[in-house]
Image (cartoon, helix red, strand yellow):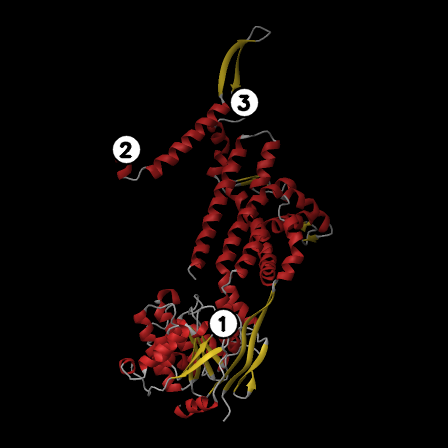
């Protein structure tokens, strides 16, 4: 069974005055279609670099990325991106921000259809009333809702999320995780999300990929998360597996991330993950 | 003092004090007219007016007012090419400024964009822009005359409607006033947040769409700051240009009145230039603040 998205021997090297600086090295990851993968690690370890290479915003210096059978060579709207800061254009309303992408992707659709797509996604993320407001009139959480709507509205092959809730307060973060999860369940878009929040990764993902510290960061551990879906926060936190998984992740971040033992994917484990999914 | 605070009179009172001080200084420098009765060499009594003061040629405020009054009370009167109401002159000057200013913006804005977008272009252009920027309008004007020496547009009657000196005037205004627009646009383009550019990249917006949907709106506030400063400079340059060409306008009128020895109206011209400049700046500030929120 071949993966939907495959990152093989992915590496990123910057040239610096002191010689080449290797940020990411030998990063191998297979993501199945419809899978939600979280990437965790310490800040600055290179997890965002991996994501932006998948997004095509950062050039790949080693290895390659294959998505749906084709090698990625640059950015494109087939990958919906949710940025850490909502990155909305402030001179456009929420609706116009979403339409900017829709016009780009669904240029063959009629104007009415395009408008309907934008209105649908903005309503689903809870902005039915506020869609014609400018970003400055929206709260940080609402802006990120627009960001999520913008990404989903393009019906991308893959969803890339770069610490999308990192700038939000805890309550808003919970709300938005819920919004993201319910939308994702409807559309089942393959997702890769960078976060440093252990609980967030357990709540959202099917697998948590742990990255070692940079330089030469790579995968240190892959933790399958097999909570049944649809997920409900309370039920998950009370699940018997929750505490052990959480401590495994935290233990990795506290100890394992600093040890330079590249993760050798046990074949059996990878298969079990796929089966569980 | 409580009384002043209560009615916020200080914002009215202090400017009045400043103005009064200024007038007093003017009076002191200008001195006053003394009428002396003397007897001339033939033994006849004569009255002689003598001006005493630090600068006896400077008209006093009341003299200045008396001489300027017809130009203010009949602001649009036209008695001759260089003898018109003050607002008629202002209109002539403003129309020339606007033409030069628009040329400056049409050239300056794209140039600023190129400088902001391309580091290579910036490096190539830097020595030229840095050297040309501080050059005075007085120095540009003769070059303009040389450059456009063959320009001569005539109307049906064989009268020149747009000659070398007109072209040189526009050239001088444009070349002097475009730099703030160029520099601010370039800074604005460089300051466009990477986030916005990433959005454009991820959505694979075409170059034209990236320019008009992302870069241009993001740069607008900077551009308008530049446009405001450029307009200020264009208005400064107009006086110099009109003095050199002798064309009718506030600056031309000023120079003519100086040559004619009627110094009173010079002060009228200076005040007019100042007030118009202030109004232009305020007007542009209004436009600018509209784009700040965008």
- The lab-note entry on whether marks 1 and 2 share a chain reads no
Q: Are marks 3 and 1 in contact (CB under 8 Å)?
A: no
Q: Is A75 situated above or below A228?
A: above
- The CA distance from mark 2 to mark 3 is 40 Å
Quadrant where the N terminus of chain B sits is top left
Query: Please, which chain is the residue tagged with disc 1 on?
Result: A
How would you rate the neighbour count of disc 1 (Cα within 10 Å): few for under 14, some for 14-19, many for 20 or more?
many
Q: Are marks 3 and 1 on the same chain?
A: no
Residue A240, given in percent of the width and then of the height, sits at: 29, 84
Of all chains, the one bearing label 3 is B
Residue B280's label in the rendered image is: none
The residue nearer to you, when weighing A157 against B220, is: A157
Where is residue B145 shown, x and y percent of the image? 70, 47
Question: Residue B43's spot in the image, x, y percent?
Answer: 57, 5
Label pair 1/2, CB-CB below 8 angstroms = no
Q: Which residue is nearer to you in this view: A143 or A161?
A: A161
Nearest to the observer: residue B149 or residue B114: B114
User: Which residue is rendered at x = 57% and y = 9% of the image?
Assistant: B40
Percent of width and height locating residue B255: 60, 36
Of helix, strand and loop, which one carries label 2? loop
Whether residue A58 can be seen here = yes
* Disc 3, SS: loop
Q: Which residue is mark 3?
A: B56
Chain letter for mark 2, please.
B
Q: Which residue is mark 2?
A: B1
- Mark 3 and mark 1: Cα distance apart in space: 78 Å
CA distance separating discs 1 and 2: 65 Å
Task: Work out whether B112 lies above or below B276.
Answer: below
Residue pictured at 63% horizontal, 44% vertical: B137
Tell me the quadrant of the picture where the C terminus of chain B can be found: bottom left
Viewer-nearest of discs 2 and 3: 2
What residue did someone put label 1 on? A46
């Amino acid at each position: 069974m071949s993966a939907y998205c495959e990152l093989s021997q992915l590496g990123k090297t910057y040239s610096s005055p002191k010689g080449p600086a290797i940020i990411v090295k030998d990063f191998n990851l297979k993501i199945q279609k419809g899978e939600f993968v979280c990437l965790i690690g310490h800040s600055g370890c290179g997890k965002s670099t991996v994501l932006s290479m998948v997004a095509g915003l950062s050039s790949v210096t080693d290895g390659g990325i294959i998505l749906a059978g084709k090698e990625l060579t640059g950015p494109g709207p087939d990958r919906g991106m949710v940025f850490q800061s909502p990155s909305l254009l402030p001179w456009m309303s929420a609706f116009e921000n979403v339409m900017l992408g829709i016009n780009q992707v669904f240029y063959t659709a009629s104007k009415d259809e395009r408008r309907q797509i934008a209105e649908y996604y903005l309503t689903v993320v809870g902005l039915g009333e506020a869609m014609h407001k400018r970003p400055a009139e929206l709260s940080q959480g609402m802006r990120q809702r627009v960001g999520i709507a913008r990404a989903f509205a393009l019906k991308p092959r893959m969803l890339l999320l770069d610490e999308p809730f990192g700038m939000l307060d805890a309550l808003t973060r919970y709300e938005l995780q819920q919004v993201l999860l319910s939308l994702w369940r409807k559309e089942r878009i393959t997702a890769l999300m960078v976060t440093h929040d252990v609980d967030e990764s357990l709540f959202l993902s099917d697998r948590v990929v742990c990255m070692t510290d940079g330089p030469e960061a790579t995968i240190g551990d892959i933790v399958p998360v097999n909570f049944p879906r649809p997920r409900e926060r309370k039920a998950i936190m009370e699940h018997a597996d929750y505490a052990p998984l959480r401590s495994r992740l935290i233990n990795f971040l506290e100890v394992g991330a600093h040890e330079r033992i590249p993760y050798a994917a046990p074949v059996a484990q990878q298969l079990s993950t796929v089966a569980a999914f | 003092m409580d009384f002043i605070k209560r009615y916020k009179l200080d914002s009215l009172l202090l400017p009045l004090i400043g103005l009064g001080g200024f007038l007093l200084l003017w009076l002191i420098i200008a001195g006053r007219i003394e009428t002396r009765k003397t007897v001339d060499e033939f033994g006849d009594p004569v009255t002689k007016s003598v001006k005493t003061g630090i600068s006896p040629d400077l008209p006093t405020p009341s003299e200045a007012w008396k001489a300027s009054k017809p130009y203010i009370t009949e602001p649009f009167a036209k008695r001759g090419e260089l003898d018109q109401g003050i607002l008629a002159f202002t209109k002539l000057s403003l129309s020339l400024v606007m033409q030069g200013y628009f040329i400056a913006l049409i050239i300056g804005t794209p140039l600023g964009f190129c400088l902001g977008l391309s580091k290579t272009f910036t490096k190539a252009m830097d020595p030229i822009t840095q050297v040309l920027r501080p050059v005075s309008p007085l120095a540009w004007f003769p070059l303009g005359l040389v450059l456009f020496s063959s320009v001569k547009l005539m109307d049906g009657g064989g009268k020149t409607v747009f000659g070398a000196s007109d072209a040189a005037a526009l050239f001088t205004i444009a070349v002097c006033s475009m730099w703030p627009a160029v520099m601010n646009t370039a800074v604005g383009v460089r300051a466009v947040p990477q986030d916005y550019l990433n959005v454009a990249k991820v959505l694979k917006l075409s170059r034209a769409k990236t320019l008009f949907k992302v870069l241009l709106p993001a740069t607008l506030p900077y551009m308008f700051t530049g446009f405001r400063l450029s307009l200020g400079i264009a208005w400064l340059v107009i006086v110099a240009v009109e003095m050199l060409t002798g064309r009718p306008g506030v600056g031309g009128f000023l120079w003519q009145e100086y040559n004619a020895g009627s110094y009173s109206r010079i002060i009228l011209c200076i005040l007019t230039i100042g007030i118009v400049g202030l109004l232009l700046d305020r007007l542009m500030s209004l436009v600018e603040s509209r784009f700040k929120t965008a």
